[in-house]
Image: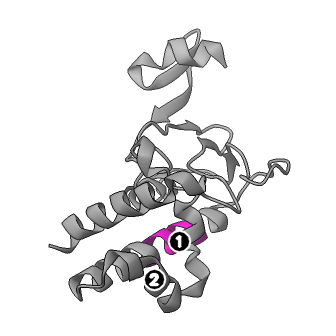
């Protein structure tokens, strides 16, 4: 692991003269510092916390962004891969590789949250009702759980989410 950090300065990982992987940062997602490592010859993407299934959490306090996360997943889906390696599951269980279909489902969930949130903000939905109304519009999104990691910080994450969506709704 240490070797790729040193070799990644040019966004590629080399072993000798052979390029073995590419490192990408497409957009803020789980946090603002998420990188994706693509191993094209293996058909694998290592996604870190950009892919924490089944309990993905968007950490707005660390620069995360649900709309940005959807953009990042969309960019990953343009890469050639068959298997995605998550950073962790979020529930303490062992990691299992994910498929392209798993990423498509995550992107669809993030897109649904973003679309519904923008529509609700445009309708002047109060901040304290936004999460409940997004959940009502699409119960599969679990947006409340996605913004909640520590109940002490939940309101701050909701505030930052609301601010971001309000900017996008203009």
Residue 18, can we see it? no
Q: Main secondary structure of the magenta part?
A: helix
Q: Which residue is mark 2?
A: 134
Residue 143 appears left or right of 156: right
Farthest left residue in view: 170
Q: Residues within 10 Å of mark 1 (few under 14, many from 20)?
A: many
User: For residue 24: magenta?
Assistant: no
Residue 99 appears left or right of 133: right
Q: Which residue is mark 1?
A: 143
Farthest front residue in view: 152
Which quadrant would residue 25 be assigned to in this image? top left
Magenta region: which residues?
105-112
- Please tell me whether mark 2 sits on a helix, a strand or a loop: helix
Quadrant where the C terminus is found in the figure: bottom left
> Going 61% across and 52% down the picture, which residue do you hit?
51
Farthest top residue in view: 16
> Going 71% across and 52% down the picture, which residue do you hit?
90
Q: Whole-percent x and y of residue 95?
A: 80, 48
Q: Upstream in the sequence, badge 2 or badge 1?
A: 2
Q: Is residue 74 above or below residue 80?
A: below
> Going 71% across and 56% down the picture, which residue do you hit?
98
- Please tell me whether mark 1 sits on a helix, a strand or a loop: helix
């Amino acid at each position: 692991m240490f070797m790729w950090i040193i070799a990644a300065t040019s966004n590629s990982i080399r072993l000798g003269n052979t390029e073995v992987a590419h490192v990408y940062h497409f957009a803020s997602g789980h946090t603002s510092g998420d990188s994706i490592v693509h191993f094209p010859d293996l058909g694998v993407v290592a996604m870190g916390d950009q892919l924490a299934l089944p309990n993905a959490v968007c950490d707005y306090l660390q620069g995360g962004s649900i709309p940005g996360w959807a953009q990042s997943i969309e960019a990953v889906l343009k890469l050639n891969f068959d298997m995605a390696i998550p950073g962790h599951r979020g529930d303490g269980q062992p990691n299992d590789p994910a498929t392209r279909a798993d990423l498509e489902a995550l992107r669809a969930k993030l897109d649904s949250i973003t679309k519904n949130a923008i529509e609700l903000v445009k309708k002047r939905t109060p901040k304290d009702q936004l999460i409940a109304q997004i959940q009502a519009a699409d119960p599969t999104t679990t947006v409340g759980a996605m913004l909640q990691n520590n109940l002490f910080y939940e309101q701050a994450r909701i505030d930052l989410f609301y601010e971001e969506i309000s900017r996008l709704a203009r």
